[in-house]
Amino acid sequence: MKETHGTGSMLPRRQDYGMNRGAAARSGSLLKFRSAVSSVSVRRSSAVLPSVLTFLVIVASGGLLLMIEKGMLNSMETPSPRGDRRRLDFIREAGKRSADEVEAEWQILHEIRNRTIRTMCSQKNMPHSVWSLSPPQRKIVLQHILVNDEYRFLYCYVPKVACSNWKRVLKVLSGTLESVDVNIKMDHRSDLLFLSSLKPEEISYRLKHYFKFMFVREPMERLLSAYRNKFGEIESYQKKYGVEIIKRYRKGHAKDSSITGDDVTFAEFVRYLLDEDVERMNDHWMPMYNLCQPCAVSYDFIGSQENLESDAEFVLQRIGAPPDVHFPERQTWYKPVTTETLHYYLCSLPQKLLRELLPKYILDFSLFTYPFPNTTTEHCQH
């Protein structure tokens, strides 16, 4: 029987976890973790699609009841008719609210996600451990979980969700990098310990006893970020994927030897994704649930890109990181995907393609409580 984490309680207050991070023990003694978040995953999205609508009704009802219980509906603003997806903006306006109000809202957001994940993970067709996954699925998740034995935690990294900065933090904690602010290009393999490199018994021990966390991001925003970065800036991706995509999906270019792959359109990229098996995708656009298999791993905390600063600080407190270790600022060259940019790309996409694409990422939307993108004619005309 799978152990279920945090089945009925709200998350502990963030300040309860080591506000004095300097007092956190470096002795390696086992921390007694109270799980805050259950976890979610699936072997294939097709295995659960028949029950997705029922699941979403349960989740929505549970989330609404929770908000009623906490008296939050009266204080929440009415969503904009333009659907500008301000799902977390009220947290960013902390200056207009008391610390207790912001804290309560932060906990409610996470509790809604926790309830969602527990509901899906309770289904019979969900994996209960990494050993119940198929070998290819298990290989993917173990290759994406990073280990820190001194602070006893596991981090599943998701490309395009602040993973480079988290890797900087891990390297500082392990002593292989002097500061998270050092201006060097991140080596994503060296000086990092991957769970896949350990023996089965070592893997099982750490999965059972270590604090486990991951971070998620709005699925289409993450996808667009990957497209703009890899096909707009990275020559190796243009040659490896761009050339193939153009030859396959651009009429009259199947045998064009002059293609460089640097002008792939977003629609062509989406057509390519539609023909790809999710378990064989590049990890920059592979669904988050395939990368981290949350039901099989049982993460103690799932943070988000939208609330990155607060969630990252919570994790650093939770693992007992030294006070001089902070989560890095965004790099100066970073080009964020704005609401307006995402609106433009999704509304410019043939809607038939978008309708066909969403099922591939259905679990990323439903499990991590992200609304589907609004691409109605009325919305796209604004």
Image (cartoon, helix red, strand yellow):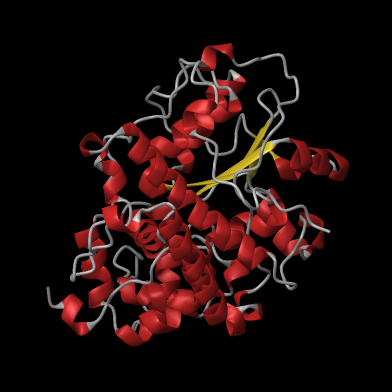
Q: Quadrant of the C terminus?
A: bottom left
Q: Is residue 93 left or right of residue 200?
A: left
The picture places residue 373, in percent across and down from the top left corner, at 33, 71
Look at the image and tell me in which quarter the N terminus lies. bottom right
Does the rendering let one see residue 160?
Answer: no
Residue 163 lies left or right of residue 181; in this view the side is: right
305 left or right of 121? left
Q: Along the line of sight, which residue is nearer the eye, 88 or 213?
A: 88
Q: Residue at x 47, y 58 (%)?
A: 66
How many numbered dots are placed on residues in this image?
0
216 to the left or right of 97:
right
Q: Residue furthest left?
A: 382
Give the residue drawn at x 58%, y 22%: 320
On the image, the x and y values in percent for residue 121 come to 67, 64
Q: What residue is at 41 percent from the left and 79 percent from the top?
A: 271
Position above or below: 165 against 77: above
* Residue 86 vertical placement versus 196 (above, below): below
Q: Residue at x 66, y 15 (%)?
A: 26
| Residue 279 shows in this picture | yes
Residue 59's spot in the image, x, y percent?
Answer: 52, 68
Residue closer to the observer: 299 or 78: 78
- The part of the image, by quadrant, that contains residue 248 is bottom left
Q: Position of residue 46 (x, y in %)?
A: 62, 80
**In the rendered view, would you say 211 is above or below 289?**
above
- Direction right: furthest residue: 201
> Relative to the observer, which residue lies in front, 27 or 300?
300
Q: Which of 56/168 is in front?
A: 56
